[in-house]
Image (cartoon, grey):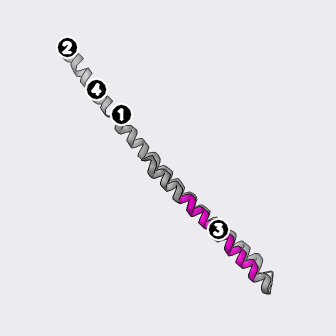
Amino acid sequence: MSKLLAMMTACLFAATMHVPAFAADAAKQDAKAHKEMAEGDYKAAKAKAEGDEKAAKEACKKMSGADERACKKEADAAADTAKKQAKADYDKAKADAKAMK
């Protein structure tokens, strides 16, 4: 009986020693998932900005001269701003994911 009790105690002790490892693995998985989600969000935001830019430039074609040039510059500026914001959000999310590890 004492051998059984000693064996059960040893098993219980060994099992409790591995719990922090499971928590660390879960944190790494969460960080990886967070980073992958941020990357997907970045790609989607970048694609949206490019699509919006293309649509705006198509609308600019209805104009002529200086108005058309100004319209295209505004479309370019809006797309650049959106892409920069997406990149900043992505960089922040990557930093957050790194901090989660």
The three-letter amino acid code for the residue at tag 1 is: Val
Residue that badge 1 annotates: 19
Residue 56 location, quadrant: bottom right
In space, the residues marked 1 and 3 are separated at their CA atoms by: 46 Å
Residue that badge 4 annotates: 13
Residue 89 lies left or right of residue 67; in this view the side is left
Q: Nearer the viewer, residue 63 or 8?
A: 63
Residue 1 location, quadrant: top left
Residue 66 location, quadrant: bottom right
Please provide the residue range marked out in magenta: 69-90
SS of the residue at dot 1? helix
Q: Earlier in the sequence, mark 2 or mark 4?
A: 2
Asked whether the beta carbons under mark 2 and mark 3 sit within 8 Å of each other, the answer is no
In space, the residues marked 2 and 1 are separated at their CA atoms by: 26 Å
Q: What residue lies at 67% left-to-right and 75% top-to-bottom?
A: 76
Asked whether the beta carbons under mark 2 and mark 4 sit within 8 Å of each other, the answer is no
Predominant SS of the magenta segment:
helix
Q: Earlier in the sequence, mark 1 or mark 3?
A: 1
In space, the residues marked 2 and 3 are separated at their CA atoms by: 72 Å
Looking at this rendering, what residue extends furthest in the left direction? 3
Percent across and percent down for residue 77 are: 67, 73
SS of the residue at dot 3? helix
Q: Earlier in the sequence, mark 2 or mark 1?
A: 2
The three-letter amino acid code for the residue at tag 2 is: Ser
Which label is found at residue 2? 2
Q: What residue lies at 38% left-to-right and 41% top-to-bottom?
A: 24
Residue that badge 3 annotates: 81
